[in-house]
Image: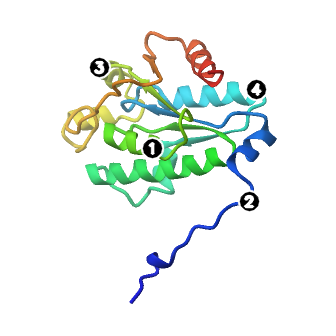
Amino acid sequence: MLSQQSCVLSHAQIVAPRARATIKSQRPQCFWLTGLSGAGKSTLANALEVRLHEQGFHTSLLDGDKLRQGLCRDLGMGPEARKENVRRVAEVARLMVDAGLIVIVAVISPFRVDREAARQLFEPDTFLEVYVSTPFEVCAQRDPKGLYREALAGRLKDFTGLDSPYEAPQSPECEINTCEVELATACTRLIELLKN
């Protein structure tokens, strides 16, 4: 007996991703911002999108917190749930890149293997890993959501960088430490990647 899943077939699409990008006069890309909570990923992602929008680019921003309130609200924070979170976000980002958009993803995505699996979904040179490398101590001082306080007090488990690991990228396309690089400069560096 066949399962419904085995009956799923792909149909060739007449309008190709390249045609969608051409009509927008841009090269679709995925900026994948990864780093600890409080590193500045969302701040950088928002500033980058504003700059791109001002320059006439068609963009979309996928922020980890917002996705956890919708698409990924059924997921916990354990390793398998984090893996599934990254998988879902990557699939959505790929569809948006196929639509010709410049997509900015801001998610902790703590495990290298999951980020590499995300990269494999994209055409070569369309996935740009950006390591927002702000140190743990600085993120803990910022603590914009009060999560570090809760985690350090033992009231929050599986917290990335404390009792759950964060595996830093080994060769990202760009690394930005937000306590050393000004926001405007960081955006300029990322936009430069679009020209290559």
**Does the residue at mark 1 contact the one at mark 2 (Cβ under 8 Å)?**
no
- Residue 54 is marked as 4
Circle 3 SS class: helix
Q: Amino acid at mark 3?
A: Glu
The image quarter containing residue 46 is top right
* Quadrant, the N terminus: bottom left
Crowd band around label 1 with a 10 angstrom C-alpha radius: few (<14), some (14–19), many (20+): few
* Quadrant, the C terminus: top right
Distance CA(mark 4)–CA(mark 3): 34 Å
Number of numbered discs: 4
- Label whose residue precedes the other's in the sequence (3 or 1): 1
Distance CA(mark 4)–CA(mark 2): 31 Å
- Residue 120 is marked as 1
x, y percent for residue 64: 47, 43
On the image, numbered disc 3 is attached to which residue? 137
Q: Nearer the viewer, mark 4 or mark 2?
A: 2
Q: Amino acid at mark 1?
A: Gln
Asked whether, in this view, residue 115 is left or right of residue 190, the answer is left
On the image, numbered disc 2 is attached to which residue? 14
Crowd band around label 3 with a 10 angstrom C-alpha radius: few (<14), some (14–19), many (20+): few
Asked whether, in this view, residue 111 is left or right of residue 59, the answer is left
